[in-house]
Amino acid sequence: MKQSAARKAVPSSVSDDPIPTFGEVFPDGALDLVRNGAFMRPRLLLWDGREQIVDDVVEYRGQRYEPHAIHETFLRELKLPAQVGTSGPVREFLPEICKLIDRFVSLPEKSTALVGRFILATWLVDAMQTAPRMLIEGPDTARARQLMQLLHCCCRRAVPMSAVTPSGLCSLPSGMRLTLLLQQDVISAKLSALLNGAVVRGNPILRAGQLRDLFGAQVVLCDAGFGEGIWAMSSIRLRCTPPPGRLPVLNAEQQQRIAEEFQAKLLGFRLSHYPAACATSFNTSKFAFPLRQLAMSLAAATPEDADLQGELHALLEEESAEIEAANWVDPNTVIVEAILAHCREAKMQSVYVGEIAAMAGKILEGRGDLRRLDAGETGRRIKNLGFSAEPRDAKGVKLRLTNEVCVRAHELAHHFDVPAVRECDCSAVGM
């Protein structure tokens, strides 16, 4: 590590005040936060692909940078690398991470492979459009908490927290790309909405007159479980069940050793693979729709390795099948399917909501679901799906089958993975 080069990197001719930063990626280098020995305040590392320069202030292309101020309570929890390590090819590094997970947590093989990819993804998250999220459930809460400790050692800028409120979440440092390790008994609707917004890049959250950039990976441990909502459908979902044998000890000394070894290697992995992660292209069409962004993010975690990316189909196959099975009888799915069926009737100019509800009910019955959708519920769902019905007449509320309505129905059919989507003939309405 070249400390003397760091001082030379800030020439006296550069007089502008340093720019506070949590890290930057440049075309020919990068800045990142690193541990400052026994001192709490971190330093900046400047990496040009060959050398690493560490100092309190570094200069890149005539501009000075310094570490962004971070509250001391966060600094106590952050496990930052001390320098850039060597990870080697991702095909060799991923099994090394999985071996560590298996040693201390002993998950099923598929779960271990997904956790390993999640860890890598946290180090490349700013190269992704959607940050990955992992949900951890019991009943083996001791194993689940030990997994959280291991993630704290390995994930990038991981911060454990509990009893999080919406206002508390919005007080996190903006733009720091934290990996949130939440242990939360209850996820309220407001907190869920904020967390869902925070996994989308370029989607700042408005709070108290300020836009907060909370984008980053998330891990949520909830003893009560998450049900079958958007959490389960778009996340890695792990269920910790007691396997044979005792849980290995993972004490504070072991955690420190793991963090010192793997944080440096993972920083090296980030700096070596970030450009390739940004350029990752991966076909997600074989996954259920809610899993596609997750699959894309996990593919970017192993950039330029088509074989590792191809393994995602098997790793997420069970989850994808469960989502598709649930989607088969989802009310929104069958309502869109019923609208499409009416769009295919070339002579039809409009259809009553009651008729859509009746057809949706027949579709459900044909799939072994005896639920019935009445016109009122169907009308509310149609409105929430973005359709505009005409005012009520003597027979009820009517939906005019315009070109725009049929196009919208097709868009929703692809969004909801409507079974057997076919091109409809809407020539009667100008399609």
Image (cartoon, rainbow, N blue to C red):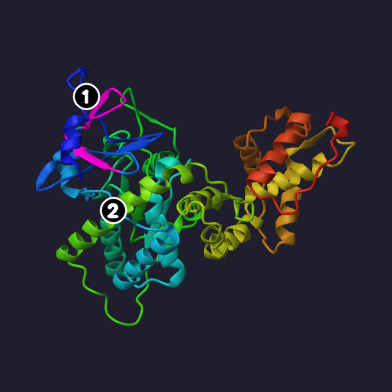
Task: Indicate the secondary structure of the residue bearing disc 1.
Answer: loop
Foreground pick, 288 / 405: 288
Where is residue 303 drawn, in percent x and y? Answer: 49, 51
Q: Magenta: predominant secondary structure element?
A: strand
Mark 2 touching mark 1, by CB under 8 A?
A: no
Query: What amino acid is labelled 1 in the image?
Result: Pro
Callout 1: few (<14), some (14-19), or many (20+) C-alpha neighbours within 10 Å? some
Where is residue 96 drawn, in percent x and y? Answer: 36, 66
- Give the CA distance from mark 2 to mark 1: 27 Å
Residue 33 position (above or below residue 253): above
- Among the 4 quarters of the image, the one containing residue 94: bottom left
Q: Which region of the structure is painted magenta? A: 51-68
- Name the residue that disc number 1 marks: 18
Q: Residue at x 88, y 32 (%)?
A: 428
- Name the residue that disc number 2 marks: 85
Q: Earlier in the sequence, mark 2 or mark 1?
A: 1
Check the image and name the residue furthest to the bottom.
Answer: 244
Residue 147 position (above or below residue 270): below
Q: Is residue 381 left or right of residue 66?
A: right
- Among the 4 quarters of the image, the one containing residue 310: bottom right
Task: Indicate the secondary structure of the residue bearing disc 2.
Answer: loop
